[in-house]
Image: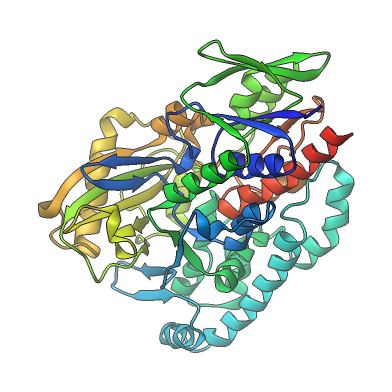
Amino acid sequence: MTRRAAVIGSGFGGLALAIRLQSAGIETVVVEARDKPGGRAYHWEKDGHVFDAGPTVITDPACLRELWALSGSEMDADVELVPVSPFYRLSWPDGTQFDYLSDDARLDEQIAALDPADVEGYRRFLQYSAGVYREGYEKLGAVPFLDFSAMLRAAPQLARYQAWRSVYSIVSGFVRNEKLRQALSFHTLLVGGNPMTTSAIYALIHKLERDGGVWFAKGGTNALIAGMVRHFERLGGTVQLGDPVEEIETTDGRTAAIRTRSGWRERFDAVASNADIVRTYDMLGHRRGPQAAARLRKRRFSPSLFVVHFGTEGAWPDVPHHSILFGPRYQGLLSDIYRGGGLADDPSLYLHHPTATDPSMAPPGHSTFYALAPVPHLGKAPVDWEREGPVYRDRILDILEERVLPGLRGRITTLFHYGPNDFESDLGAHLGSAFSLEPVLWQSAWFRVHNRDDRIPNLYFVGAGTHPGAGIPGVVGSAKATAGLMIADLAA
């Protein structure tokens, strides 16, 4: 008899898991609460513009291509990936710019302009990054940590690379220029981590980008999601939209069925959740649910995000696809974001300009953007976002107009924002966190939510809250780890 599995949530992790299960002959149904698939990779179409909610930085395309290769297919039939260069343009308030790319000669030239002594330091950092990439990503990125012995086996190599130290601390041991330290450590923010506290293992992101490049899906990240859905359905899978799961029913200590808001109920041999980890346990119809949810609520969660989406008249040929605008403070701003207390008036920003690569994401003669600022989650700062949202939006537009988009306000044609309250209400994200558990060492690998629950043997997790963590490569890696467990369990 064919085994049946349900996947709750259609983010990158949920769809990657569903494709793996369906490719293995397991009849799989994806149940999505919202009207479109994608989870955090949702999108809007407004006034002829296509606005991706995020994520927008695609790295390690090989992990995505593997999802098609499982069934002898080619990702290119569904998705067109195009390279982005520079990977990012970094800028500081004093006018300094640094293009982060894969051209060694150009990188050396820019590093030497900051501090000639740091050219050799950068080369040594790249060697370090390659080592943690090998140990932390290639060897452990898709391996489930179900017992502490697995952590002990990994410990010697993690200790070799001083995993207890922070990314910023490690980077500072290789280069001395402060701007370069920021340029080589900010990547952890892309997965919800504070460079000052996130494990040095996350320095692997630098190697991941240098080797695999930074890519963009033609049509936007939403086009990659749509391609994954097409491939999954072609394999025989089913996606149900617009119907939130309200309960994961259990019988004799095992998941038995799921029930949605509409009243739809179906029995399954296994259930995997790509939903928020706290929310998942809240809807588990077993005493394990409230106990696990209560423990998770005591843990450290990543910050939220405030995102300003806007469309403009005209083109901006001097603005690259990805820009990082550092503010006047680095460590102090990070403390404001992660420790909370209030909103910083001097945010650092990530500016996404997809029409630099794909003009079709805006009407003819127009451009599409979003600007993103990390902000404290709802448990860290008592912010009235209904009142403060428009004010913070205007502050961000002021910074953009002053530093990279002169005359911006006179050219805006479409404008809206998305903040912590939206992450909580639309995505069920605990405290409006944009990346689930904060990726500190004591909340990573075995210390993170396990890919398979310890008490409910046919309840599984995929996505940012489980191992290995957030980011497209991370959640696709979690799908590989979780799929291996599910396929083996359902075959037993």
Q: Is residue 427 above or below residue 412?
A: above
Would residue 376 be seen by someone viewing this image from the given angle?
yes
Q: Is residue 474 left or right of residue 339?
A: right
Picture quarter containing residue 9? Answer: top right
Q: Residue at x 50, y 31 (%)?
A: 431
Picture coordinates of residue 229, whole percent (x, y)? 53, 42
Picture coordinates of residue 80, whole percent (x, y)? 46, 60
Q: Residue at x 35, y 57 (%)?
A: 352
Picture coordinates of residue 62, whole percent (x, y)? 62, 62
Residue at the farthest top position: 263
Q: Is residue 57 above or below residue 310?
A: below
Q: Residue at x 75, y 20 (%)?
A: 255
Would residue 437 be seen by someone viewing this image from the given angle?
no
Along the viewing direction, whichever of 415 and 15 lies nearer the viewer = 15
Q: Is residue 284 left or right of residue 115?
A: right
Picture quarter containing residue 276? Answer: top right
Q: How many marks?
A: 0
Q: Is residue 460 left or right of residue 224?
A: right
Along the viewing direction, whichever of 137 and 325 lies nearer the viewer = 137
Picture coordinates of residue 28, whole percent (x, y)? 66, 32
Q: Quadrant of the N terminus?
A: top right
